[in-house]
Image: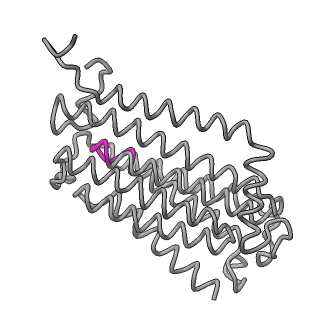
């Protein structure tokens, strides 16, 4: 059962990711991104991170992708770009080589570190992670306990981001309105 | 083939999938020219890292990994807001700009 869930979620993630980088229309790319994000949310549920799965769906699929779609439609760039045009000849082969190199290096280090992280058998259920609503309780104790300073700094970050974005996109009125 | 011998997926599977997702995101950032799609590929890479954090949190029985994912999501949201603001202000000046047209930082 877990294997079926993993295979289906992995198929969602990979198909969506390939859709993001291969579809020529930005709207289709954004919708493929939703597929990937849902697949990652399913994997979060499979790994007993229920709160993060909910946040993943609400924040990523619900807010960030909608923001992407708003900007795409607002700017009117929802035309298909011709991705067959290749300004630099060697760029795509080099990019694929770099990507495969990154994947193989990380996979090699994962396989080399299998003993260190102890993934010899199936995932046992660690007592610390728990299940159900105790996952939320544990995250709350961690966020508001050990990492409360980082949490407060995060609020400052959000305020800075909002104010900075308003400043960035504000139209500077020229002439008489600017009193 | 001991990797496929186990009936249920281990954390190694999730880590390998996260690595593949990260690689796909890297290729997307390097290949695509539309700055919006490049941003989506950055989101792919962030999600790959989140997935590996959650896999290791499960594996090691440490809730700190999930807390880190929480903060990564907040920072990613702030990053998207600022990045899309920059893209909107660029596109307003020169419509249809690709990443090649905005190599100089001055407007």
**Position of the C terminus of chain A by quadrant:** top left
Corner quadrant of residue B96: top left
* Residue B67 image point, x, y percent: 70, 52
* Residue A12 image point, x, y percent: 45, 73
Residue most toward the bottom? Answer: A1
Q: Residue at x 50, y 29 (%)?
A: A160
Q: Residue at x 81, y 73 (%)?
A: A120
Q: Nearer the viewer, residue A1 or A72?
A: A72
Q: In the image, is A12 to the left or to the right of A70? A: right
**Total number of numbered discs in the rendering:** 0
Q: Residue at x 19, y 53 (%)?
A: A84
Query: Is the stretch drawn in magenta largely helix, strand or loop?
Result: helix
Corner quadrant of residue A130: bottom right
Q: Residue at x 51, y 45 (%)?
A: B76
Scheme of colours in the image:
one colour
Does B31 lie within the magenta span? yes
Residue A123 sits above or below residue A179 on the image: below
Does B79 lie within the magenta span? no
Q: In the image, is A67 to the left or to the right of B50? A: left
* Residue A6 image point, x, y percent: 58, 78
Residue most toward the right? Answer: A127
In this picture, which residue range is highlighted in magenta? B27-36
**Position of the N terminus of chain A by quadrant:** bottom right
Residue B32 sits above or below residue B101 on the image: below
Residue B21 sits above or below residue B80 on the image: below
* Residue A15 image point, x, y percent: 40, 70
Q: Nearer the viewer, residue B31 or B49?
A: B49
């Amino acid at each position: 059962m877990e294997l079926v869930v993993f295979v289906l979620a992995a198929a969602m993630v990979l198909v969506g990711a390939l859709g993001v980088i291969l579809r020529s229309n930005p709207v289709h790319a954004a919708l493929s991104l939703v597929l990937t994000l849902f697949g990652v949310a399913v994997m979060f549920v499979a790994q007993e991170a229920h709160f993060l799965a909910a946040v993943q769906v609400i924040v990523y699929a619900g807010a960030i992708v909608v923001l992407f779609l708003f900007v795409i439609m607002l700017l009117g760039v929802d035309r298909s770009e011709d991705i067959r045009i290749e300004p630099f000849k060697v760029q795509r082969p080099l990019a694929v080589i770099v990507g495969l190199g990154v994947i193989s290096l990380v996979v090699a280090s994962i396989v080399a570190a299998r003993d260190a992280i102890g993934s010899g058998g199936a995932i046992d259920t660690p007592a610390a992670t728990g299940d159900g609503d105790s996952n939320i309780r544990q995250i709350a104790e961690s966020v508001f306990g050990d990492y409360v300073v980082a949490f407060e700094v995060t609020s400052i970050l959000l305020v800075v981001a909002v104010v900075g974005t308003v400043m960035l996109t504000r139209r500077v009125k020229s002439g008489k309105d600017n009193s | 083939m001991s990797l496929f011998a186990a009936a249920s997926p281990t954390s190694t599977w999730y880590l390998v999938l996260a690595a593949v997702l990260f690689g796909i995101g890297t290729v997307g950032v390097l290949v695509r020219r539309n700055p919006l799609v490049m941003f989506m590929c950055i989101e792919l890479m962030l999600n790959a890292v989140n997935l590996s954090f959650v896999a290791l949190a499960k594996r090691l029985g440490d809730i700190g990994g999930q807390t880190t994912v929480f903060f990564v999501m907040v920072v990613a949201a702030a990053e998207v807001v600022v990045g899309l603001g920059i893209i909107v202000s660029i596109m307003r000046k020169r419509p249809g700009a690709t990443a090649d047209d905005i190599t100089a930082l001055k407007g």
